[in-house]
């Protein structure tokens, strides 16, 4: 883009035109900032909800995950024969396995007596379940019958369990119509599909849910040797095992859950539509501001054209106005987004955080919004004919 000069002195014409009317500039920046905040929040909520759906998935100590091909998501898990997981041990690269029962059971709040579904994971206390090695020592208390570990980050609707336990009280509650005792706390965090989590032994799990066949599990965790390639081992196991099980890498297991919420629910569409609405609103505001600016200074543009300045030079002035607006509007939108993300995290425990990819994406949208509006406003310059204006 060319810049208008006066002798050897550069004249910041685009900046002077923007700041000539401070109130109009503030209105434009407020509109861009609002659009940016809306896009940050909608996209942040969308990704936060998707990330929240795999809170527990990320914690598993596994390289591969075995599951039933009939399982749809964490809220609709189907069982498969545990012997398939044992058969996987025959592979030379498999170092360890952990069978896991996974289901939602009704928990009765011991304070209010209201009931709410809670995710219950049953596993052998001596097995490795999560990456956090502290859990191994905590899990030993689960060898006693009808003992559970309660997730202290579960939502408050389950009762003040963590506070009572920390105070040294004996905490008992009703789970699936049977009495259980809380013998410890873990920190996992709620997910989009589960408001709270409980860990227990497989023996207790089968007692709580007697309809589960003893030889059936919902998840099979597979740990490989250090030099093993998870993708190759997964492909090998798919060939050797019957088709009544599905083998996924750890990342594939995470993607499997996210894809369910993205494709089988309206969540992704709703929040994407919200971000698109923010883009449209911002585009309209910026277009009105730039179009009015060009219209108000049409005689000046016509004079410059009469002096010999080419139309593309004047187009460059308007384009620079769009760039200035994009930068000045993005900065407060980013700062506000960071603050609102922190508020959402503290209020809802959703893993909403700013990341580089989303930051660049929103800035690109704002830049496109401002430059697109500038391009539309430039059409007014075509009418800047000195013969018609003067």
Image (spheres, rainbow, N blue to C red):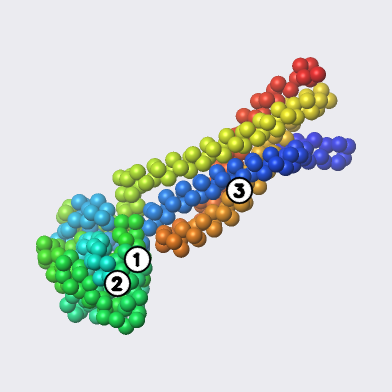
Q: Name the residue at 70% across, 41% down.
A: 23
- Give the structural element (helix, strand or loop) at label 1: helix
Instruction: Quadrant for residue 216, please give it.
Output: bottom left
Provide residue 363's location: percent of width, then percent of height. 57, 47
Nearer to us: label 2 or label 3: 2
User: Counting other residues with Cα less than 10 Å from the Cα at mark 2, is it few (<14), some (14-19), or many (20 or more)?
Assistant: many
- Give left or right: position of 332 versus 156: right
Which numbered disc flags the more N-terminal residue, 2 or 3? 2
**Quick check: 167 above or below 260?**
below
The x, y position of residue 134, in whole percent, is 34, 78
Query: Which residue carries the number 1 mark?
Result: 156
Question: Residue 150 bears which disc, if any?
Answer: 2
**Residue in the picture at 17% in, 52% down:** 243
Label 3, label 1: how far apart the Cα atoms are: 37 Å
| CB atoms of marks 2 and 3 within 8 Å | no
Residue 177 location, x and y as percent?
16, 67
Which numbered disc, 2 or 1, marks the residue closer to the eye? 1
**Observer-nearest residue: 69 or 38?**
38
Q: Residue furthest bottom?
A: 168
Give the residue displayed 86% in from the left and 41% down from the top: 9
Provide the residue designation for mark 3.
330
Q: Point out the tag, 2 or 1, that comes first from the N-terminus.
A: 2
Say if mark 2 contacts mark 1, CB within 8 Å: no
313 relative to 115, above or below: above
Instruction: Name the residue: 75% across, 37% down.
Output: 17
User: Count of labels shown?
Assistant: 3
In three-dimensional space, the C-alpha distance between marks 2 and 3, rounded to whole angstroms, equals 43 Å
Q: Position of residue 158 (x, y in %)?
A: 30, 66
Packing grade of label 1 (10 A; few <14, some 14-19, many >=20) is few
Q: Which quadrant holds the C terminus?
A: top right
């Amino acid at each position: 883009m060319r810049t208008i000069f006066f002798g050897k002195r550069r004249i910041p014409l685009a900046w002077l035109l923007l700041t000539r009317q401070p109130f109009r500039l503030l209105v434009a920046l407020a509109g861009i900032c609002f659009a940016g905040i809306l896009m940050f929040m909608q996209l942040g909520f969308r990704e936060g909800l998707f990330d929240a759906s795999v809170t527990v998935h990320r914690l598993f100590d596994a390289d591969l995950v075995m599951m039933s091909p009939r399982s749809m998501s964490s809220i609709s898990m189907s069982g498969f024969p545990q012997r398939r997981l044992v058969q996987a041990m025959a592979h030379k690269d498999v170092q360890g396995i952990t069978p896991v029962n996974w289901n939602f059971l009704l928990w009765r709040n011991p304070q209010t007596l209201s009931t709410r579904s809670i995710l219950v994971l049953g596993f052998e206390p001596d097995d490795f379940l999560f990456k956090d090695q502290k859990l191994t020592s905590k899990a030993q208390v689960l060898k006693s019958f009808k003992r559970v570990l309660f997730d202290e980050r579960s939502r408050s609707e389950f009762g003040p369990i963590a506070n009572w336990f920390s105070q040294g009280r004996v905490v008992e509650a009703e789970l699936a119509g049977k009495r259980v005792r809380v013998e410890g706390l873990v920190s996992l965090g709620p997910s989009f599909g589960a408001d709270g989590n409980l860990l227990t032994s497989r023996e207790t799990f089968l007692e709580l849910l007697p309809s589960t066949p003893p030889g059936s599990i919902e998840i099979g965790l597979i740990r490989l040797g250090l030099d093993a390639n998870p993708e190759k081992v997964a492909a090998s196991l798919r060939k050797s095992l019957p088709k009544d099980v599905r083998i996924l890498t750890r990342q594939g297991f995470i993607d499997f859950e996210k894809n369910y919420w993205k494709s089988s629910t309206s969540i992704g569409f709703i929040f994407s539509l919200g971000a698109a609405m923010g883009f449209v609103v911002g585009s309209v505001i910026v277009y009105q501001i730039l179009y009015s600016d060009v219209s108000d200074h049409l005689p000046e543009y016509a004079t410059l054209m009469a002096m010999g300045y080419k139309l593309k030079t004047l187009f460059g002035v308007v384009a620079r106005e769009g760039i200035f607006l994009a930068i000045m509007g993005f900065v407060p939108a980013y700062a506000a987004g960071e603050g609102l993300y922190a508020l959402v995290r503290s209020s809802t425990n959703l893993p909403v955080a700013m990341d580089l990819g989303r930051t660049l994406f929103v800035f690109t949208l704002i830049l496109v919004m401002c430059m697109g509006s500038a391009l539309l406003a430039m059409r007014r310059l075509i009418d800047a004919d000195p013969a018609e204006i003067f």
